Image (cartoon, rainbow, N blue to C red):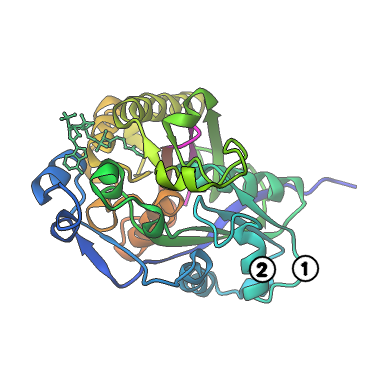
């Protein structure tokens, strides 16, 4: 029997952010910081925080609804769900199974990806592999973060607390038949063209949340709470340098192996950790300013959700259109990094 070739197409994307906006001025009442410092060092002007009690899967539901509506399907029409988050409802299980149940999806496979800020990159690459192997036909990829409750909103945690926000994004990713050539950078066939993923665990403790964890005697102790180990910690300067280096490296490798120049990219959707990181990456790659989508000013760093939120807003603003050649690009805790090249 002749083997049918399939390609992986993003059919719909949606996002959701909580209504409550928290300005830099508001944070400066809780810790020793200022609007000027945060804007100058990060580009962030405000971020969204959930109300107490809103979970990561609660926040994801409207994003999923939007993605499904744009794709013209129901969540129950998907045969797999992939979650990507560092802030799940429970330590275990992950958000994949919790969403499977909330959405009434039937007993489909559900898994979680723990690639932090690279969640979308790893999630899309994983979905693409499942689809091209024939193991799945339509996958719901959900990237959602409720990070505000784990931030140390005191002077001790000010380097981290001003950076992060809550948000969610979702993608409906579908198998479509491929009559001729598969999607490539030099043709107009829609779909995921290529993905690159990398990791370096020597950076695990340069950006991490220690407790609860098996490294803590007893998994979770009062001593861990007192030491602030229940809050994320980071060596900001080292992370900053690694982010720029790895994102540029990954993007250049992607351009080279697909035989394209930066000017052929219609849009770059980078992770939103720091506007200065994205500006340095853009300059090093030689990409025009209007080809890079940023929204960190409004939302801060929403970790796995940043790129899907950018995608969804870029679609709404008419900056991401069918036929565009798009590069996603991220670096995050782990360390993990990578990019996807997509004919949208
Ligand atoms: N407000 C005011 N001052 C602050 C502050 C805050 N919120 N946070 C830190 N500072 C202080 C520091 O204590 C330091 O003071 P010192 O010079 O007296 O020691 C000073 O500001 C400068 O710190 P530095 O770390 O050099 O600043 P920076 O320009 O590197 O900016 C980050 C700090 C965190 C914004 C930046 O390093 C960064 O964005 N890192 C990577 C973030 C990232 O990518 N995270 C997630 C990856 S997905």
Q: Which residue is mark 1?
A: 107
Report whether 184 appears left or right of 242.
right
Q: Which of 10 and 88 lies nearest the eye of the viewer? A: 88
Q: Which of 74 and 306 lies nearest the eye of the viewer? A: 306
Residue 341 drawn in magenta:
yes
Residue contact between numbered discs 2 and 1, judged by CB atoms under 8 Å:
yes
Report whether 193 appears left or right of 289.
right
Q: Give the x, y percent position of residue 74.
A: 61, 75
Q: Classify mark 2: residues with Cα within 10 Å, few (<14), some (14-19) or many (20+).
A: many
Q: Which residue is mark 2?
A: 100
Q: Is residue 13 above or below residue 31?
A: below
> Is residue 37 visible to the viewer in this orientation of the structure?
yes
- Which residue is farthest front? 222
Q: Is residue 335 above or below residue 324?
A: above
Q: CA distance from mark 2 to mark 1?
A: 8 Å
Q: Which of 167 and 222 lies nearest the eye of the viewer? A: 222
Q: Classify mark 1: residues with Cα within 10 Å, few (<14), some (14-19) or many (20+).
A: few
Residue 207 drawn in magenta:
no
- Which residue is farthest left? 36
Report whether 242 appears left or right of 278.
right
Which range is magenta? 332-344
Residue occupying the point 33% across, 64% down: 49
Where in the image, quadrant-wise, is ligand 1 located? top left
């Amino acid at each position: 029997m002749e083997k049918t070739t399939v390609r992986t197409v993003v059919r719909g994307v949606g996002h959701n952010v909580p209504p409550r906006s928290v300005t830099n001025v508001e944070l400066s009442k809780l810790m020793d910081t200022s609007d000027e410092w945060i804007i100058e060092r990060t580009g962030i002007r405000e971020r969204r925080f959930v109300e107490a009690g809103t979970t990561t899967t609660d926040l994801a539901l409207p994003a999923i609804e939007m993605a499904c509506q744009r794709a013209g399907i129901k969540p129950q029409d998907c045969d797999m769900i992939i979650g990507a988050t560092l802030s799940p409802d429970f330590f275990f299980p992950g958000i994949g199974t919790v969403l499977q149940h909330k959405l009434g999806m039937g007993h489909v496979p559900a898994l979680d990806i723990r690639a932090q800020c690279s969640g979308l990159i790893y999630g899309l690459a994983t979905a693409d592999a499942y689809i091209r192997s024939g193991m799945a036909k339509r996958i719901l990829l959900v990237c959602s973060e409720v990070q505000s409750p784990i931030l140390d909103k005191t002077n001790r945690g000010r380097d981290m607390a001003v950076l992060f926000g809550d948000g969610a994004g979702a993608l409906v990713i579908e198998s479509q038949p491929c009559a001729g050539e598969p999607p490539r950078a030099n043709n107009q066939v829609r779909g995921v063209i290529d993905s690159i993923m990398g990791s370096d665990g020597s950076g695990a403790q340069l950006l991490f949340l220690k407790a609860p964890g098996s490294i803590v005697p007893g998994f979770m102790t009062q001593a861990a709470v007192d030491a602030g180990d229940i809050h994320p910690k980071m060596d900001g300067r080292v992370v900053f340098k690694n982010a720029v280096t790895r994102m540029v490296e990954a993007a250049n490798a992607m351009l080279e192996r697909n035989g394209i120049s930066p000017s052929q990219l219609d849009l770059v959707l980078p992770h939103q950790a720091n506007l200065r990181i994205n500006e340095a990456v853009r300059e090093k790659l030689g990409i025009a300013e209007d080809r890079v989508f940023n929204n960190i000013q409004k939302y801060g760093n929403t970790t796995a959700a940043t790129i899907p939120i950018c995608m969804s807003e870029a679609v709404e603003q008419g900056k991401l259109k069918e036929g565009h050649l798009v590069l996603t690009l991220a670096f995050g805790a782990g360390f993990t990094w990578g990019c996807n090249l997509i004919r949208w």
